[in-house]
Amino acid sequence: MWWQGVQAAGFRKYAGEFMAIDVSPRAQAMGGAYGAVVSDVTAGFYNPAALAQVKQTQVAFMHTWQFANFINYDYVGFARPLAYGKTLGLALIRLGVDNIKDTRAALVGSGEGDFRLDLSKVRQFNAADYVLFISLGQQVSSRLLLGINAKFIRRNLADHSANGLGFDAAALFTVSPRFRVSAMLRNITSTLIAWDTGEKELVRPTMSLGSAYVFDVPGMPARFTPSFELLVRTETLPNLDNGGSGFNNSGIFTGIAGGELLIQDVLAFRAGVDELQRASFGVGLHIPHLFVDYSFTSFDQELGNSHRVGLVINFGS
């Protein structure tokens, strides 16, 4: 019943953290500092304004092995350009723990104060969170892009479920061909998630302000892109580095950073530091119509490491 305890403890304060987990290995490898970098179908998650840069139909897939394969995290995304500088995005994420054993009804008393486990009465259940994103990116001018998200949330825990609805807004501004800045406001009016038990969770607004600059590497057919992002929260986060004990009390403002070295537009090496001061690393391979990315983040000996693999497929000439 570990998962149920974690969920119950986080009902009110940390209800929305499952919606903040990276869906792109490229983004995770760069510490999550991705709002001013993203230019593909995953923009629906990181900065829906950047979807307006997608000029051909794209699909994306991602799977994460996390916490010693105990938790599975999956993402699928789709983007399609429309008329008048608009691009539509659809995405679905699932975070879940499957086949959890429930032994509460299986403990049988002997009448003498001791108990035994009746295996015939052990049942299994799943705990899973789903979020459906509907995104729209709009090119306002040659420099300014704007975007919005609608998020439909479904949470399942054993025999109980919850539903919620939230909205995001974002902007991407090209200062120069090499320099871009971004802004993303998540859960604009706060997102309410209501359980069938009467419990209510409130996901408060957060803001991220990002920047990225592209440098040519002297003497190499390569480019280096450092990216930075300032996260503005209204509450602190649980400290996952300590297995969930304690809190990350860095305050309302937190900085994250990352970088990408792209060689001949084919091979990419990435590194970054995320909101919980964890180092992350990754590589990417770009071939015609296909982008393959991998990232790695270290937690601790008990929680294991996070391995993320993703594909972006581009349908176009």
Image (cartoon, grey):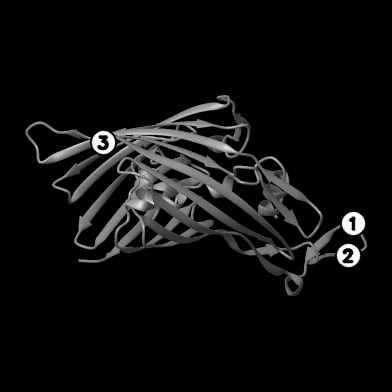
Which amino acid is tagged 3? Thr
Which amino acid is tagged 1? Gly
What is the crowding at mark 3: few (fewer than 14 residues within 10 Å), some, or many (at least 20)? some
- Separation of disc 2 and disc 3 at Cα? 67 Å
Q: Is residue 248 visible?
A: yes
Q: Is residue 233 left or right of residue 114?
A: left
Q: Is residue 313 left or right of residue 233?
A: left
In the figure, residue 145 lies in which quadrant? Answer: top left
Q: Position of residue 160 (x, y in %)?
A: 74, 62
Residue 110's disc number: 2
> Which quadrant does the C terminus fall into?
bottom left
Badge 3 is on which residue?
225
Q: Are marks 1 and 2 in contact (CB under 8 Å)?
A: yes
Nearer the observer, 310 or 85: 85
Badge 1 is on which residue?
113
Whether 174 is drawn above or below 122: the answer is above
Q: Position of residue 228 (x, y in %)?
A: 37, 31
In the figure, residue 179 lies in which quadrant? Answer: top left
Earlier in the chain: of badge 2 and badge 3, it is: 2
